[in-house]
Image (tube, rainbow, N blue to C red):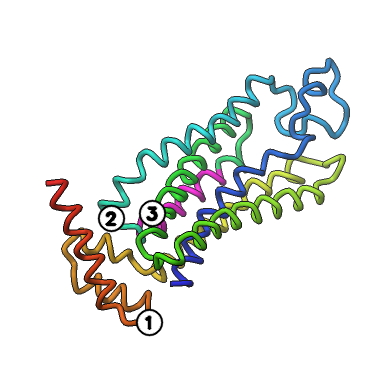
Amino acid sequence: MRRSMAIALLGAAQFGWLMSEMAHLPFNNKQLCAAPRTPAGQCLLYPGHSNAEWNMQSSAWAVGGGLGALLSAYPADKFGRKRTLGYNGIVMIVGALVQMLAGDIYSFAIGRGISGVASGVAINVLNNYIREIAPRQWRMFYFNIVQVVIGFTALCVTSIMYGIPKLPESDWSFKPLFGGPIFLGLFQLVFMNAIIESPVWLLQQNQVDAARSAMDALYKAGDIDDHFASVAASVGRQMDETK
């Protein structure tokens, strides 16, 4: 279970990264960016951008996150939690690449929107996955771990910003910061097969034997007969109610 949870939590790390990556004040100092002559080392990200354009890229991540969360139920129910979490790594990679390589703030906003979709999918499916696989007495602990990972990643990103030169020689002195989620997405994709599928989803697909095997793998040292029977009965009632 811990291995599956650790890989799934990469999505929370991506959320924390995107949440904090724009916090570097020299990227957008509202007053200095609006000045007739921008001081050296200020308004680093796409100099000359307006406040409305900056708000656009900020909103793009939020809008993408909402869309990702809203649409995530379909792939999670159709293809399973495991594949949805794993292949969401591709969306993370694409979003980060677009941001890192964007030549203007509009392209950058598109990248932020794509990354937002990945963030929404990651958090929504991750929370559902935790609810389905974690023992009842441990669920709140794992939900708290999601917040810890988000906060710790944000702290790491803001710490990296101290390494950005005060007078960067080029955009590539700071643009690699936006490529960090590429590695998170790659790890999520490469290690997807190490995630144990949710027994609840397998039961919903009438894959009873596979669900039992998944639960055995999740709870290696425990007697799961009663727990499996309880989960199977609960899923059965839910499926009957939706008919």
Element type at marker 2?
helix
Q: Amino acid at mark 3?
A: Asn
Magenta residues, as a range?
A: 83-97
Q: Amino acid at mark 2?
A: Phe
Q: Provide residue 51's location: percent of width, then percent of height.
A: 68, 20
Foreground label between 2 and 3 = 3
Residue that mark 1 sits on:
220
Q: Specify whether 165 is left or right of 125.
A: right
Foreground label between 2 and 1 = 1
Q: Amino acid at mark 1?
A: Lys
The residue at the point 19 percent across, 60 percent down is 205
Q: In which quadrant is the N terminus drawn?
A: bottom left
Residue that mark 2 sits on:
79
Of pointers 2 and 1, the one earlier in the residue sequence = 2
Give the main secondary structure of the magenta stretch: helix
Q: Provide residue 122's location: percent of width, then percent of height.
A: 45, 50
Contact check, label 1 and label 3, Cβ < 8 Å = no
Q: CA distance from mark 2 to mark 1?
A: 25 Å
Of pointers 2 and 3, the one earlier in the residue sequence = 2
Residue that mark 3 sits on:
128
Q: CA distance from mark 1 to mark 3?
A: 22 Å
Q: Specify whether 27 is left or right of 219.
A: right
Of pointers 1 and 3, the one earlier in the residue sequence = 3
Q: Is residue 50 above or below residue 115?
A: above
